[in-house]
Image (spheres, grey):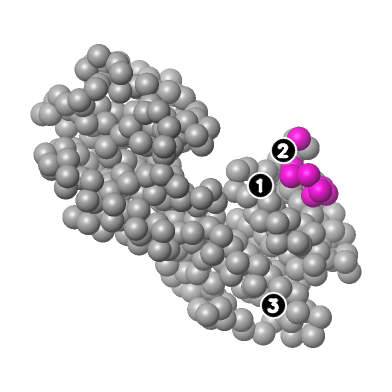
C-alpha cells in the first residue's frame, strides 16, 4: 500500500512514523509543507518532496498510486491536505494544534474545522485531544484513541549511573530532572522559580535541566540571579542512551508545560520509574495520579510546584520507589508503541480498503 505522509518538516516523531510505515511493509512518500528537508535524515527508501502550495500538494496526494494520506498538525498540514483533495485523509493531532493553537485563534479554529470535515478519521493521542476535536464538530466515532507511546523497548537502564552523582554535594542529593525544550510553552521559569523556593527549604534538592532552546540566555541568567549555580546542572541536549542514564540517576521528574497531549518525555520518565510532578493540564491528568504516580500543580504557580517538590522530597526513598514502580506499570499497560502502532496500521489498511470499495467516508471504529 502506498501512502503520503504530510508534515511541516522532519522531526523525530515524523521519522518515527515513517520508520513504522516501512516496517509494516507500506510504501510511504514524505511531503514537507514548510521546512527544507535534510535528505540525510529521511529514512532510506522513502521518497520525499516539498510542496509550497495546495496545487503542488494536490499533484502528489491525488496521484492514483497514493491509496491513503496521513497529515498533521490538523489546522496546517491537515487543512492543506483536505483542500488538496486528499482521500481518504487520516489526520494526526500533535496535541498543541488543537489544545493550544485552536483556543487562541479563531482563524486557526476555523482551519481545524475545515480539515476535520474532510477527514476519514482523526488519531488522538489523549482524551483531551478527542474532546477538543468533538467540540469542533468531529464525530466521536471518527476519533481513534492511540497514545503514540514509546518506540524503544520498555527496558530498564542497566549501564553505569550518570556521572553527575559523583559531583561533590550530589551523591546523596534528591535529583529532580527536566528534559523539556527551553521554549515559552514549557514554562522553565516556573520550574526554576519553584525549584529555588523548594531548595531554600530543603538544600538536598538538585535540579537537572537537560535540553536547550531559544530561552537559553534567560534560563542561565535566572539560575545565576537566584544563586543556584551549584544546585542546577545543565547537560544540554542528550541522546536516548544518555537520557536513560540520566533518568536512572534521578529521583523525580518535573514538567511545567502550559499544554501537552501525551508527552513522550513524561512517558519516558515514568518508564524509568520516576514519580512525575507536572502541571495540572488535561494531557497530564491521564497519566499522573496524585499520590500514586506523582503530583500535579496549577500551571504557572511556582509556589505550588515548590510544595509538591518538598512533599516528594520528604517521602521515604521506599515510598518514592513504590510510586515510580506504579508509574512504570502504567506505561507498560498503556504506552507500548508497538501495540498501538499495530492499531494505526490497521486503520490505514481499512481506510485504503474503503477507498477501493468506494466507501472512504464510512465511519470506522477500532476495537
Residue 4 x/y as whole percent: 77, 59
Q: Earlier in the sequence, mark 2 or mark 1?
A: 1
Q: Secondary structure at mark 3?
A: helix
Q: Secondary structure at mark 1?
A: helix
Q: Residue at x 17, y 32 (%)?
A: 198
Q: Quadrant of residue 111?
A: bottom right
- In this rendering, the count of numbered labels is 3
Q: Earlier in the sequence, mark 2 or mark 3?
A: 2
Q: Which residue is mark 1?
A: 15
Residue 213 appears in view: no
Residue 151 appears in view: yes
Residue 210 x/y as whole percent: 42, 30
As for residue 44 lying within the magenta part, the answer is yes
In whole angstroms, how far apart are the C-alphas of marks 2 and 1?
A: 8 Å
Q: Secondary structure at mark 2?
A: helix
Quadrant location, the N terminus: bottom right
- Residue 138 or residue 153, whichever sits in front: 153
- Residue 165 or residue 130, whichever sits in front: 165
Q: Earlier in the sequence, mark 3 or mark 1?
A: 1
Q: Which residues are magenta?
A: 40-49
Q: Quadrant of residue 90?
A: bottom right
Q: Which residue is mark 2?
A: 41
Q: Are marks 2 and 1 in contact (CB under 8 Å)?
A: yes
As for residue 274 lying within the magenta part, the answer is no
Q: Which mark is residue 36?
A: none
Q: Which residue is mark 3?
A: 350
Amino acid at each position: 500500500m502506498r501512502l503520503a505522509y504530510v508534515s511541516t518538516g522532519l522531526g523525530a516523531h515524523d521519522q518515527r512514523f515513517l520508520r513504522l510505515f516501512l516496517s509494516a511493509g507500506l510504501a510511504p512518500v514524505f511531503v514537507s509543507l514548510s521546512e527544507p528537508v535534510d535528505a540525510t535524515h529521511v529514512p532510506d527508501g522513502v521518497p520525499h518532496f516539498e510542496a509550497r502550495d495546495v496545487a503542488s500538494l494536490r499533484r502528489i496526494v491525488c496521484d492514483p498510486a497514493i491509496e491513503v494520506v496521513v497529515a498533521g498538525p490538523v489546522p496546517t498540514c491537515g487543512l492543506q491536505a483536505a483542500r488538496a483533495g486528499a482521500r481518504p485523509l487520516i489526520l494526526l493531532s500533535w496535541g498543541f494544534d488543537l489544545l493550544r493553537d485552536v483556543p487562541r485563534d479563531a482563524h486557526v479554529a476555523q482551519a481545524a474545522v475545515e480539515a476535520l470535515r474532510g477527514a476519514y478519521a482523526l488519531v488522538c493521542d489523549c482524551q483531551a485531544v478527542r474532546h477538543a476535536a468533538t467540540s469542533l464538530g468531529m464525530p466521536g466515532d471518527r476519533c481513534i484513541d492511540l497514545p503514540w507511546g514509546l518506540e524503544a523497548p520498555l527496558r530498564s537502564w542497566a549501564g553505569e549511573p550518570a556521572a553527575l552523582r559523583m559531583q561533590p554535594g550530589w551523591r546523596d542529593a534528591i535529583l529532580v530532572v527536566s528534559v523539556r525544550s527551553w521554549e515559552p510553552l514549557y514554562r522553565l521559569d516556573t520550574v526554576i522559580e519553584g525549584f529555588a523556593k523548594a531548595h531554600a527549604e530543603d538544600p538536598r534538592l538538585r535540579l537537572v535541566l537537560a535540553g536547550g532552546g531559544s530561552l537559553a540566555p534567560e534560563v542561565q541568567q535566572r539560575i545565576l540571579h537566584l544563586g543556584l549555580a551549584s544546585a542546577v546542572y545543565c547537560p544540554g541536549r542528550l541522546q536516548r542512551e544518555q537520557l536513560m542514564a540520566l533518568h536512572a540517576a534521578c529521583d523525580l521528574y518535573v514538567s511545567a508545560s502550559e499544554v501537552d497531549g501525551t508527552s513522550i518525555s513524561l512517558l519516558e520518565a515514568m518508564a524509568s520509574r520516576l514519580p512525575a510532578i507536572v502541571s495540572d493540564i488535561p494531557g497530564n491528568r491521564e497519566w499522573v495520579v496524585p499520590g500514586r504516580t506523582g503530583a500535579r500543580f496549577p500551571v504557572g504557580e511556582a509556589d505550588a510546584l515548590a510544595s509538591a517538590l518538598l512533599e516528594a522530597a520528604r517521602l521515604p526513598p521506599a515510598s518514592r520507589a513504590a510510586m515510580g514502580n506504579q508509574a512504570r506499570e502504567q506505561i507498560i499497560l498503556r504506552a507500548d508503541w508497538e501495540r498501538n502502532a499495530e492499531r494505526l496500521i490497521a486503520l490505514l489498511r481499512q481506510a485504503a480498503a474503503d477507498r477501493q470499495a468506494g466507501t472512504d467516508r464510512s465511519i470506522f471504529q477500532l476495537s
